Image (tube, rainbow, N blue to C red):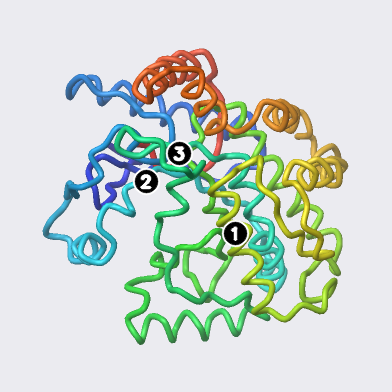
């Protein structure tokens, strides 16, 4: 279908909205894509979109090629196997100046665990409780292994060129981490920051809330030139990266019950406390830009827990994994048809 792209495993497809400045237009385009996909797969067979970000009911032992003749897809299968068979939501926010974009990358990479904690929707794999709230992020291969925080655009370009020359990256898209600078001619021409850490978000209203949170933070970064881990702390870049990775690992296991280390002051604190202050800090920027209304739904998630936590609570109360997923499938479909507005890029499974 026009606007949809294949992924290496044929249980996934990807679509991306065009860039827009207002949420109403973005929402309408996003939901048009999602509902078009829902309606198409019904014509093929008894198929539906599955909430969550992993193969909750299986089978994760077998890779289902969408295009065996594609050498890049074959490389992914042989290198990573079904660890890549996940569904996620990638949110891109435009930033015109390359140096400012690299600074925004440093900030958001240090804070990506907050967005993972909010969006965790993959506590199950192959019908079993995994012990993780985002087993997707636990399993997904971040590659190359050691991605710097990058001091400037020139160092980013030089590093990417080195990875491509060495074969560590097969192409410019083969940079898999929580956040990355991006552009139509990356790495040299950049125009957006892409947050890649979020699990697939089924609830449209919650998706707009997380998108608004990211955009508001970037608005703040644009307004405050000293908002930068390289300026506000004396922590070495390697230490910042290690803390960010440790926070992501903690969030993947415990989502909104995690305790994370805040980069700005080194404090270890409950992620709910960090998020509560974070949301209030960016709210004035969202208000000034006219989209603060979308932040409202985040307060409810902080109170009730992530989707993963809510699903696990149902299992603890006696429901089976299959029952939880069946109910979530029905709820997601009803919600999609009742709520026709959205934004961003997402893998759908």
In the image, residue 33 lies at what x, y percent? 41, 31
Q: Secondary structure at mark 3?
A: loop
Please tell me which of labels 2 and 3 falls first in the chain. Answer: 2
For discs 1 and 3, the disc positioned in front in the rendered view: 3
Image location of residue 266, percent across then percent down = 80, 65
The Cα atoms of the two marked residues, 1 and 3, are separated by 27 Å
Residue assigned mark 3? 122
In the rendered image, the vertical position of residue 77 relative to residue 272, given as above or below:
below
113 horizontally vs 176: left or right: right
Residue 55 falls in image quadrant: top left
Give the labeled residue for mark 1. 192
- Is 337 located above or below residue 33 in the figure? above
Rounded to the nearest angstrom, the CA distance separating label 1 from label 2 is: 23 Å
* Left or right, residue 259 beside residue 292: left
Separation of marks 2 and 3 at Cα, in angstroms: 9 Å
Is label 2 in contact with label 3 (beta carbons under 8 Å)? yes
Residue placed under numbered mark 2 in the picture: 86
From this view, report whether residue 54 is shown above or below residue 223: above
């Amino acid at each position: 279908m026009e606007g949809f792209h294949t992924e290496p495993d044929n249980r996934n497809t990807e679509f991306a909205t065009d860039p827009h400045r207002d949420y109403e237009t973005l929402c309408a385009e996003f939901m048009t894509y999602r509902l078009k996909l829902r309606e198409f797969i019904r014509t093929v067979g008894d198929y539906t979109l599955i909430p969550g970000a992993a193969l909750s009911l299986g089978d994760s032992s077998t890779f289902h090629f969408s295009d065996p003749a594609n050498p890049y897809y074959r490389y992914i299968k042989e290198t990573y196997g079904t660890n890549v068979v996940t569904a996620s939501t990638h949110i891109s926010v435009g930033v015109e100046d390359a140096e400012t974009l690299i600074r925004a990358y440093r900030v958001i990479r240090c804070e990506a665990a907050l967005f993972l904690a909010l969006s965790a929707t993959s506590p199950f794999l192959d019908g079993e409780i995994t012990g993780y709230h985002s087993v997707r992020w636990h399993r997904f291969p971040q590659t190359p292994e050691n991605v710097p925080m990058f001091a400037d655009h020139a160092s980013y370009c030089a590093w990417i060129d080195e990875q491509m020359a060495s074969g560590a990256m097969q192409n410019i898209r083969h940079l898999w981490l929580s956040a990355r600078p991006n552009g139509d001619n990356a790495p040299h021409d950049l125009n957006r920051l892409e947050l890649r850490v979020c699990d697939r978000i089924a609830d449209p209203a919650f998706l707009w809330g997380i998108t608004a949170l990211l955009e508001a933070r970037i608005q703040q970064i644009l307004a405050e030139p000293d908002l930068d881990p390289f300026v506000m702390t004396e922590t070495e870049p390697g230490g910042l990266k290690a803390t960010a990775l440790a926070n992501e690992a903690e969030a993947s296991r415990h989502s909104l019950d995690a305790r994370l280390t805040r980069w700005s002051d080194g404090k270890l604190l409950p992620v709910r406390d960090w998020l509560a202050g974070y949301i209030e800090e960016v709210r004035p920027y969202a208000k000034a830009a006219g989209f603060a209304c979308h932040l409202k739904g985040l307060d409810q998630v902080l109170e009730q827990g992530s989707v993963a936590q809510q699903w696990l609570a149902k299992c603890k109360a006696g429901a089976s994994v299959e029952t939880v997923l069946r109910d979530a499938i029905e709820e997601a479909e009803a919600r999609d048809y009742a709520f026709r507005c959205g934004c961003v890029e997402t893998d759908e499974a």
